[in-house]
Image (cartoon, rainbow, N blue to C red):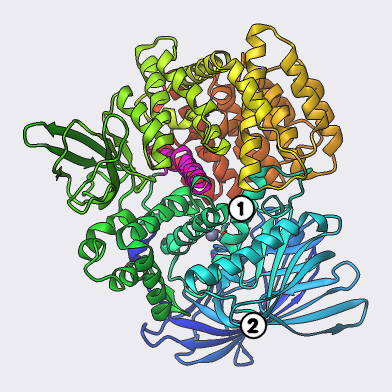
């Protein structure tokens, strides 16, 4: 049963006020809900239909009297609901300890937590569980005082005290009307790091980070990130914290990264806890960005929310854009900003591009869904953020800030649509390239698929002109046959053959934005003396695939001289990609050209480039991005080509790797700042290259050094880096190192997740990685019940290790089907994520393709699949 975007209708009733009482008990929690219901006169009178799932209904009263009702699937229908405002009281129970789906109210480590987005509130009590129904909540929590000393909900604590039988209570009031998906409750034996802060406006706030006893010292980074986020949002967008108290809570069992519940953000501990000994630089960076993301939702998501779930990118695309901007501002230097941008784009290409060309391809604003949880995707989030970035490119940074201001002036307190956002940005910038093309620009919301942009230039020596012809085409996606041209802002410049920037116009600008809005357009530049090298799509100004037809010589000019750091990196990636694709298409072994190797040596030894940039430039394109460039995908061939390229880089640059390793040791105490983490990244890459090369040369020195570094490391980045160097090279010392690592960290679940993931993601050699990963499902520490652990092994293998997963004997697919089915009985949301490993089965080469299809069909044949998994596997089957 698909839900369609165009079927949206307002509800016949609003719920304006809710008074909730929880008698918390893991086996049977009693929920009493008293609601103030208002007739919505804009809609004809009809029955009141409330959502409810997995609940036991005890009673329903309207204005104090019992009414007749019926239960119809997941709805409670009150046929005789008055054509007037009334008071509705409902009592029901639910069972938190049996809630392994982790949606609604559940227990984890003996405490209570909630996850309501998107539709979890209906698993707590009957309600109009849709984001356009916004109510003011008062929440009374009652629970055993010794087991649950901390009782939290949204808003402000207004009362608390003791009750009989060792129980106690707390009353929370949230003054802001909110949709039910932002509701939250936490109850348990937790401790908090606290910080009082005063904002620019002179208001005082209490910030708290709640975690389990023993984790307190791992919350400092999260607290610092929270404070930095507050300062940034006020400075950049004039958006202050609107609550006296802002709470963040960590939980070990959580389906996603984190959740922006009003005033009470709930985090997966993996996105919250960090210490130098247990978290890597990447973890520190991710925590900073997720803490910021959830905090930023307070305005983009909570104060202005979504009218319906099709508008999800309204809050997610915008909030990802905001957290990306925050991370760049925090990084500081232009080079560190570029590193952030490159990492974001690499992520987009590795995850979103394949989504856009696979069975689940959908527009940033989807048109239909069976299960909304399946649409918390990298398209809605990351492509959505690129769409917001294009608004900013088209109206400028100041113009975008003015647009945001207008958006809040118009819509504060409302549940709105992506159209409302677009109108606000355009209306604040009349006459801008956005405002004059708004309808065309909005195709970014309605068309799935990654546009292909082709650029060809022609120099006319006699006329001294350079004519650039741009053409675009978006491939068909399931259900969307033909596509219209989109608005593609192409930030660009021209370089002469020595790398000097050329003036593009009489004013002498060396950079401009070409706005493509037709299938084909030409742009002419005057006074160009000789054949220039175009630098197009600078800073990745649009989420498209660019074919600029540049020669290796031109790419080398860009790589050495482009003023745009993103395009310098991109040129190097393209050089590598060209080699790899050429070898794959010709079916020949990959041989890197001397010119390419010398270019890479030049980057590695460059006196001025940042180590973090060097590390990105020297890392080859990912296997999933390479697969994206091919019509028929042979995962084993791609893996072999990448391994060959890596081995050649390792051996050809051996002396340079040694020098780089030695030159990038970080002295002093650990801090995760961009400069030190860049040095560690490059040193760890050098080490992994040296251990890899030792394997072919038979040298024992570097594996020994790596083992020593692994043992002596004073932080997790270096320890895991050294361990990965051993494991990824298949070194003999990998086994003792893994054993030692496990013994050291056996009590730290987040580190043991890394231990599983590292083994499941290791480069495949002769099927050994697959065999090891499969055996690890029997390890006493493995469980499907904890999403982080399930992901660390199953998703790592099936989604992030193509060469281990795609086997000629189909054992990977059998494993996948077994895991998806087992997981579906426990947690459909996680099962459905893992199910997506097969999104692109239909482009696989044989024998993979047929075997993959068979595995998908086996899962689809199971009669009692969740809606979540069913939607994924049926779309997969239909895509072939
Ligand atoms: N709104 C959350 C975030 O972006 C994600 C929660 C989604 N949860 C889910 N079960 N679909 O931070
Ligand atoms: Zn979000």
Residue designated by label 1 = 256
Q: Residues within 10 Å of mark 2 (few under 14, many from 20)?
A: few
Secondary structure of residue under mark 1: loop
Quarter of the image where ligand 1 sits: bottom right
Observer-nearest residue: 602 or 349? 602
The quadrant in which residue 736 appears is: top right
How far apart in space, not on screen, are marks 2 and 1 (Cα)? 32 Å
Residue ID at (80%, 66%): 192
Asked whether, in this view, residue 230 is left or right of residue 543, the answer is: right
Q: Position of residue 49 (x, y in %)?
A: 50, 75
Q: Is mark 1 within 8 Å of ligand 1?
A: yes
> Residue 203 has which mark?
2
Residue 347 included in the magenta stretch of the image: yes
**Residue 303 seen anywhere in this rendered image of the structure:** yes
Q: Position of residue 705 (x, y in %)?
A: 76, 21
User: N-terminal of the two: label 2 or label 1?
Assistant: 2
Q: How many marks?
A: 2
Pick out the residue farthest to the right: 165
* Secondary structure mostly seen in the magenta stretch: helix
Pick out the residue farthest to the left: 462
Observer-nearest residue: 620 or 236? 236
Which contiguous range is marked in magenta?
A: 336-360
**Residue 129 seen anywhere in this rendered image of the structure:** no
Asked whether, in this view, residue 326 is left or right of residue 217, the answer is: left
Asked whether, in this view, residue 91 is left or right of residue 361, the answer is: right
Pick out the residue farthest to the top: 698
Q: Quadrant of the N terminus?
A: bottom left
Observer-nearest residue: 743 or 677? 677
The quadrant in which residue 573 appears is: top left
């Amino acid at each position: 049963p698909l839900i369609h975007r165009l079927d949206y209708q307002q509800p016949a009733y609003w719920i304006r006020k809710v008074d909730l009482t929880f008698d918390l008990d893991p086996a049977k929690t009693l929920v009493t809900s008293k609601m103030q219901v208002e007739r919505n006169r804009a809609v004809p009178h009809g029955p009141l239909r409330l959502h409810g799932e997995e609940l036991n209904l005890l009673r329903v009263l309207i204005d104090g009297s019992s009414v007749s009702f019926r239960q119809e699937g997941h709805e409670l229908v009150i046929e005789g609901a008055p054509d007037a405002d009334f008071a509705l009281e409902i009592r029901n129970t639910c069972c938190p300890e049996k809630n392994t789906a982790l949606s609604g109210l559940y227990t984890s480590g003996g405490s209570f937590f909630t996850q309501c987005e998107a539709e979890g509130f209906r698993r707590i009590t009957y309600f109009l569980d849709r984001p356009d129904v916004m109510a003011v909540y008062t929440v009374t929590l009652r629970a055993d005082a010794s087991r649950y000393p901390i009782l939290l909900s949204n808003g402000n604590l207004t009362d608390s005290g003791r009750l009989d039988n060792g129980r106690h209570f707390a009353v929370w009031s949230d003054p802001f009307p909110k949709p039910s998906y932002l509701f939250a409750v936490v109850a348990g034996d937790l401790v908090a790091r606290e910080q009082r802060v005063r904002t620019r406006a002179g208001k005082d706030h209490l910030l708290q980070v709640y975690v389990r006893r023993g984790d307190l010292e791992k919350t400092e980074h999260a607290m610092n990130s929270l404070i930095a986020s507050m300062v940034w949002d006020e400075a950049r967008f004039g958006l202050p914290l609107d609550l006296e108290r802002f709470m963040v809570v960590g939980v070990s069992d959580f389906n996603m990264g984190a959740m922006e519940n009003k005033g009470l953000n709930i985090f997966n501990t993996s996105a919250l806890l960090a210490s130098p000994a247990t978290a890597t630089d990447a973890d520190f960076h991710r925590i900073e960005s997720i803490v910021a993301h959830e905090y930023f939702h307070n305005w983009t998501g909570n104060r202005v929310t979504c009218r319906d779930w099709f508008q999800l990118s309204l809050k997610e695309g915008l909030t990802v854009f905001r957290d990306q901007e925050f991370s760049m501002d925090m990084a500081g230097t232009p080079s560190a900003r570029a590193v952030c941008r490159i990492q974001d784009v690499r992520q987009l290409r590795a995850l979103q591009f394949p989504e856009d060309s696979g069975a689940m391809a959908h527009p940033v604003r989807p048109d239909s869904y069976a299960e909304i949880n399946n649409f918390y995707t990298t398209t809605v989030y990351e492509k959505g953020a690129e769409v917001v970035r294009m608004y900013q490119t088209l109206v400028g940074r100041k113009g975008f800030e003015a647009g945001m201001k207008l958006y809040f002036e118009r819509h504060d307190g409302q549940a709105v649509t992506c159209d409302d956002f677009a109108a606000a940005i355009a209306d604040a910038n009349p006459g801008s390239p956005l405002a004059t093309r708004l309808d065309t620009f909005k195709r970014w919301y309605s068309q799935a698929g990654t546009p292909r942009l082709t650029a060809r230039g022609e120099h006319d020596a006699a006329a001294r002109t350079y004519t650039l012809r741009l053409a675009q085409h978006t491939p068909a996606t399931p259900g969307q046959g033909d596509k219209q041209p989109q608005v593609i802002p192409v930030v660009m410049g021209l370089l002469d053959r020595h790398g000097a920037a050329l003036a593009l116009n009489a004013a002498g600008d060396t950079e401009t934005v070409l706005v493509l809005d037709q299938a084909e357009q030409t742009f002419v530049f005057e006074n160009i003396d000789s054949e220039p090298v175009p630098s197009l799509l600078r800073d990745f100004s649009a989420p498209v695939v660019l074919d600029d037809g540049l020669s290796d010589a031109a790419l080398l000019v860009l790589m050495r001289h482009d003023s745009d750091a993103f395009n310098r990196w991109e040129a190097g990636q393209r050089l590598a990609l060209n080699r790899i694709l050429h070898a794959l298409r010709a079916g020949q072994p990959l041989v890197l050209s001397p010119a390419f190797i010398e270019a890479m040596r030049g980057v590695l030894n460059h006196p001025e480039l940042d180590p973090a940039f060097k590390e990105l430039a020297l890392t080859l394109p990912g296997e999933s991005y390479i697969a994206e460039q091919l019509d028929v995908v042979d995962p084993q061939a791609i893996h072999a080509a990448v391994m060959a390229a890596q081995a050649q880089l390792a051996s050809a640059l051996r002396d340079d790797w040694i020098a780089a390793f030695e030159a990038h040791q970080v002295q002093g105490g650990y801090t995760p700042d961009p400069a030190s983490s860049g040095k560690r990244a490059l040193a760890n890459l050098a080490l992994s290259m040296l251990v890899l090369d030792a394997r072919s040369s038979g040298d024992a020195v570097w594996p020994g050094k790596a083992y020593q570094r692994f043992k002596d490391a004073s932080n997790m980045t270096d320890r895991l880096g050294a361990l990965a160097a051993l494991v990824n090279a298949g070194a003999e010392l990998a086994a003792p190192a893994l054993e030692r690592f496990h013994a050291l960290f056996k009590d730290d679940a987040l580190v043991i997740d890394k231990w599983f993931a590292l083994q499941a993601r290791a480069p495949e050699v002769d099927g050994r990685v697959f065999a090891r990963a499969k055996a690890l499902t029997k390890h006493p520490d493995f469980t499907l019940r904890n999403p982080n652990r399930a992901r660390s092994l199953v998703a790592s293998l099936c989604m992030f290790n193509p060469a281990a997963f795609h086997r000629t004997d189909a054992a990977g697919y059998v494993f996948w089907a077994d895991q998806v089915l087992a997981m579906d009985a426990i947690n459909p949301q996680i099962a459905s994520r893992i199910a997506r490993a097969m999104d692109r089965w239909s482009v696989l080469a044989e024998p993979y393709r047929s075997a993959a299809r068979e595995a998908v069909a086996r899962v689809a044949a199971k009669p009692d699949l969740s809606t979540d998994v069913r939607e994924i596997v049926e779309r997969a089957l239909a895509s072939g």
